Amino acid sequence: MDITISVTDGVPIYRQIINQVKYLVASGLLQPGEELPPIRTLALQLKVTPNTIVKAYGDLEILGVVHKRRGSGTFVSEGRPQLAIRERRRVIEQRIDALLAEAHQLNFTVDDILRMVRERKVVMNPNDHAERAEVER
Amino acid sequence: MEQTVVVDVNGLSRSFGGKTALESVSFRAAAGQIYGLVGANGAGKTTLLKHLLGLLRATTGSVRVFGLDPVRDPVGVLGRVGYLSEERDLPEWMSVDELMNYSRAFHPTWDVSYARELLETFALDPAKRIKELSKGMRAQAGLIVAVAHRPQLLILDEPSSGLDAIVRRDILDAIVRAVVDDGRTVIFSSHLLDEVERMSDHVTLIHQGRVTLSGMLDDVRHSYQRSHVRFAEHFEQPPVLETALVIEGGGRTWSVVHSGSLEQFRHAVVARGGEIVESRNATLEEIFMARAGRTRQAEAA
């Protein structure tokens, strides 16, 4: 499981783990039914106290993102977690904020940016005719 | 939650030749938890750890490890404790192999296969003499001696000091394994605050022989914030703000480490015609500087 911990931004480590697991689930990188790494494995990988992983997994269970199976491990729950949409929006909005700030610096209007976003989409997916039609119009 | 108390230090004071090393220090450690001890060099961390091992006798106050006095009952305590000293004082003349057999003789619980596994992981040559080992290898050999009898309490004094990243990882691995595999208690001192922040469930800050901060790491972290503040007015000198511990910056924008509630701080800022632009929990490093760095500067001045 691809998780990175930073101790410079003031966010508690268990919270960083919770956020990243939620992100991995929301983005489909972790699929329902998939098993999370055992506490020992993740603690050794991240070099953090095992009790932090216990706390993070416990909170993720309360949030309904994962569930524990007795004598087995911790698994991603079926169905998107309730916070997924808000969380996904938050991730994208951060990017948009940064984009708008940079655009403003470089004298692009919001309409310029919207047009350029569509153009880039066409470049990245040249087979997507509907989008192409939208841009040409 | 009921937790077994492993270490119980109460009102411990100690001085060396009239110089106070520890002053009414109290410290408790429960089973299955990792305790990080931080503080500047000479703050008293090693002195506290040596009391837990019975290497020093309490002048005043009491020290109990597994409910025993380590000075009066060294066998009862040391048999259940693994210790890696800051100096890694190992018998220089022995080979690594001899060191393993020697240590094993003291500990009925010595786990031969675990010791061998660690030797292989660290790629330590059993035939090599201790005095021929590099600094990192000495730390690894010392670590094996400290953990291979699977002690109930693992005490590490500056385990990462002066070591490269690879050996540091080995040491952190050993700490995690002691807690996960055996439910043991670990007390380690370190000046590497990012390591303490990652590895500790509890943190205790010792400053000039006194405990100035102690608690669950998350609770400690929640009681300090770092806020960016902007004022309408231009300040030449740092503005006086209630609950502020460290103020850096200049003019209209200042960065402040403060304790107490954010509401209380906001009040103080608004009263001076400012606003909080951004706020987050302080890092351990920022808290440490606020709690230990400042007074040191003030006294030097």
Image: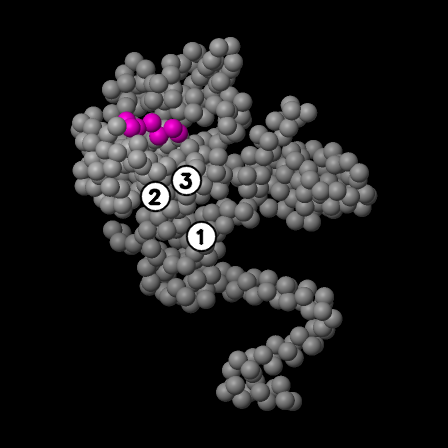
Which residue has dot 2 on it? B170
Q: Which chain carries label 3?
A: B
Asked if residue B88 is among those painted magenta in the image, a careful observer would answer yes
Q: What element carries label 2?
A: helix
Q: Mark 1 and 3 residues: CB-CB less than 8 Å, in contact?
A: no
- Label 2 or label 3, whichever comes before in sequence order: 3
Residue B136's quadrant in the figure? top left
Image location (x, y in percent) of residue B49: 39, 24
Q: Which chain carries label 2?
A: B
- Local crowd size for mark 1, using a 10 Å CA cut-off: few (<14), some (14–19), many (≥20): many
Q: What element carries label 3?
A: loop
Q: Quadrant of the C terminus of chain A?
A: bottom right
Same subunit, tags 2 and 3: yes
For the residue pair B84 and B23, the one nearer the viewer reads as B84
| Residue type for callout 3 | Leu
Which residue has dot 1 on it? A17
Which residue has dot 3 on it? B163
* Magenta span: B86-92
| Residue type for callout 1 | Ile
Write the residue at 64% across / 78% down.
A116
Residue A30 visible? The answer is yes
Same subunit, tags 2 and 1: no
- Distance in Å between CA atoms under marks 2 and 3: 11 Å
Same subunit, tags 1 and 3: no
